[in-house]
Structure formats: C-alpha cells, structure tokens
Image (cartoon, helix red, strand yellow):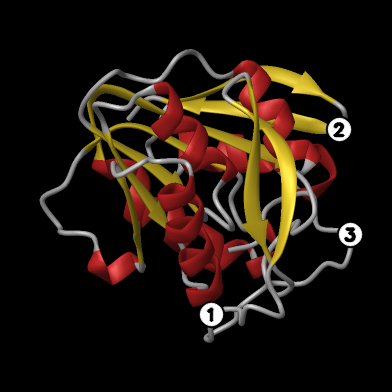
Amino acid sequence: MTGTDDPQGEHYFTARPASAAQRRTVRVPLAGQDVEVETAGGVFSPDHVDLGTQVLLRTVPQPPAAGDLLDLGCGWGPLALTLALTSPDARVWAVDVNERALDLVRRNAAHLGLPNVVAALPDDVPDDVRFATCWSNPPVRIGKPALHDLLRRWLPRVAPGGDAWLVVGKNLGADPLQRWLTDEADLPTTREASAKGFRVLRVAP
C-alpha cells in the first residue's frame, strides 16, 4: 500500500516478488539501530524511510510489549520491523496488498532475527485477531472511498484500551480525515503532532 510521502503519486501494486537482481540493500535507522534491509522497486519509498513514517516514529509511544500489533500498509516494513524490534514478545502483523512488499518484509524480518513478524495479505489475517495497537502510513492516494473502507475494516479491530496511530499529509486531507473518523466513522480521533507537512492522528476506538 502506498503511504503519504509518495512523490510520484502512484499506488504501488506488484504481484510478483522481486528477483535477486531487482533487490537492493540499504541501511536505515529503526528502533534506535542502524540496520540493513532489502528493498526493491515496485514498493513505496524503496530507498529510505519516508518522511511521513519518520514523523510517525518520532511521535508514537512505546508499543505494547505483548499481544497482536498491526502495521497496516506495511510496504517493505519500516513500521512492522520497528514494532518487532521494540516488542520481541508481541506478534506483529505486517499487512499489505502488494506481494512484493510482503516478500521483502519476510526477508527483512528473517535477516534481523525477528520471528514475531507475520507478513500477510488482508484476507489472511484471522477475523478473531484484535490488535493492541496499529501503526500506519495509510494509502491515501487510493482515493477517499477506498481509504474509508480500509479504515472502517481495520480500526474497529483495535482491542479495548488500545489505539491506532496514523500519519497523513496535511495537503492530502489529514484534517478532513480526522473529522470523518470522529463524526462519521464513530472512531474518536485526536491530532497528536504536526510536523513537516504531516499530521499524526491517534484513533481510540
């Protein structure tokens, strides 16, 4: 899924995993560490941790130490890998529609020794799983109706007492999205930070 820092304005969807020739290795900061990950073209922000995700990571509190945690629209995995590095006793669901992205998440989790990461297509997540938290740089460029459907599907699955953290570009509709979440989706939402053209929203279902 595409995040909110996409200079090409594209929604990435790649059915095939990247070949060895297509994959490349980059070093990125995650969970206070400088780590090596694999990325490839055909996924969002393949060469670095995008600015929106950086803003989110600087804002969110420490994730729960246990339970099921969700990265919705995981891409190559910066949020999912951070969750897994920070909470090794939790199960981290990295969810995306892009098979190439999921393959990269699996490779990166294996390389970093993170057996607690489960990279899955949306329909492969069991219906009874409830999440202690959700971190997401959601795919706003898929359009408002599709984005609303996506959030209506996943945010109510946050467990009582849990929350979801979303980063959305101000110029890509962060403020109207906050109003829609609170007023129409009945998902109370507050703005927790605003930086570098992005809003960080906390949803407490």
Closer to the camera, 149 or 176?
Answer: 149
Task: Look at mark 2 in the image and give the residue it sits on.
Answer: 197
Residue 105, horizontal then vertical, whole percent? 49, 57
Going by the numbered disc 1, the residue's amino acid type is Pro
The residue drawn where x is 67% and y is 53% is 3
Q: How far apart are marks 1 and 3 (CA)?
A: 23 Å
Image quadrant containing the C terminus: top left
Q: In terms of secondary structure, where does tag 3 sit?
A: loop
Q: In which quarter of the image is residue 84?
A: top left
Task: Look at mark 1 in the image and give the residue it sits on.
Answer: 17
Q: Which of marks 2 and 3 is in front?
A: 3
Q: Is residue 196 left or right of residue 83?
A: right
- Looking at this view, name the residue that lies furthest to the bottom: 16
The residue drawn where x is 37% and y is 41% is 114
Q: How far apart are marks 2 and 1 (CA)?
A: 32 Å
Q: Is residue 129 left or right of residue 38?
A: left
Task: Look at mark 3 in the image and give the residue it sits on.
Answer: 7
